[in-house]
Image (tube, rainbow, N blue to C red):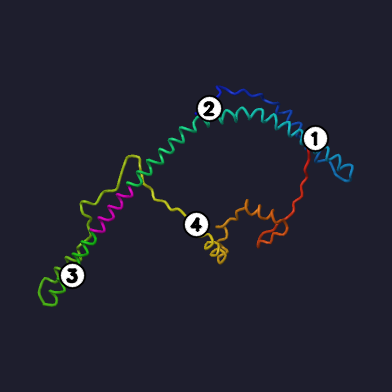
Amino acid sequence: MTTAHVPDSVVIARPDQDAMQRGATSALAMVQAFEVTDDATYGLAADELSAIKRKASQLDEQRKAITKPLDDAKAAVMALFRGPLELLSQAEGAIKSKMLAYSTEQRRIADAARMQAERAAQAERDRLAREAAELAAQGRTGEAAIKEQVAQMVVAPPAAVPAPVKAKGIAVRTTLDVRVTDLLALVQYVAQHPELIDMIEPAMPRLRAYGKGLGTRCNLPGVTVVEVESIAARK
């Protein structure tokens, strides 16, 4: 693995901001006052456009001369830390996965113990209810006491039920996530409920590629392919 070289310092040449501002302001003022009225002024406008693009290109080269050393230094710093950070991120993900698996298993065990306690308590309720019914059928005393015992009986988890997993600084959070399992079904539902149309966005890169491929022959419902004119100029 190669070690990224991070420079100790970066030296930049500061341009004259006032001079750049004056040049750009002058170009804008001239263009705002210029009128294209015939072929001759159209040609002059084309010349001025090329001059503006050359000036912009020169400024952009000056900008890159300043930003490139900064960008290179930043890239070197990012590369320096990328490997260790990726390893630590993998370690974090692995330990979280193991902790979550353990927490989930303990919760499953606790839920199973509670269900077993509930079944046992319900069986006891049923037994006492049967005894009460038998006593009532025989006209014997004690029915009221047994019914009271049944009414007061509550489900109490046994001592063996595990307590929730706890660790200092650690919390298991439960959040909701939404996943589309049947896009066609969702689209069909939204088609019947147009007030929900904001929940669906077209895949514009693929849609543009499809529309440009067909050109003006594209007849997708709700989609229009238009021709947009622009001026292209060389520097």
Q: Nearer the viewer, mark 3 or mark 2?
A: 2
Q: Which residues are magenta?
A: 103-116
Please say if the residues under marks 4 and 2 sit with CB atoms less than 8 Å apart: no
User: Is 189 above or below relative to 62?
Assistant: below
Give me the C-alpha separation between circle 4 and circle 2: 42 Å
Q: Residue at x 50, y 60 (%)?
A: 182
Return the mark for residue 51: 1
Q: Amino acid at mark 2?
A: Ala
Please say if the residues under marks 3 and 4 sit with CB atoms less than 8 Å apart: no
Residue corresponding to mark 3: 129
Q: Amino acid at mark 3?
A: Ala
Residue corresponding to mark 4: 180
User: Is residue 115 found inside the magenta-colored segment of the image?
Assistant: yes
Give me the C-alpha separation between circle 3 and circle 2: 79 Å
**Residue 102 located left or right of residue 73:** left
Q: Residue furthest front?
A: 1
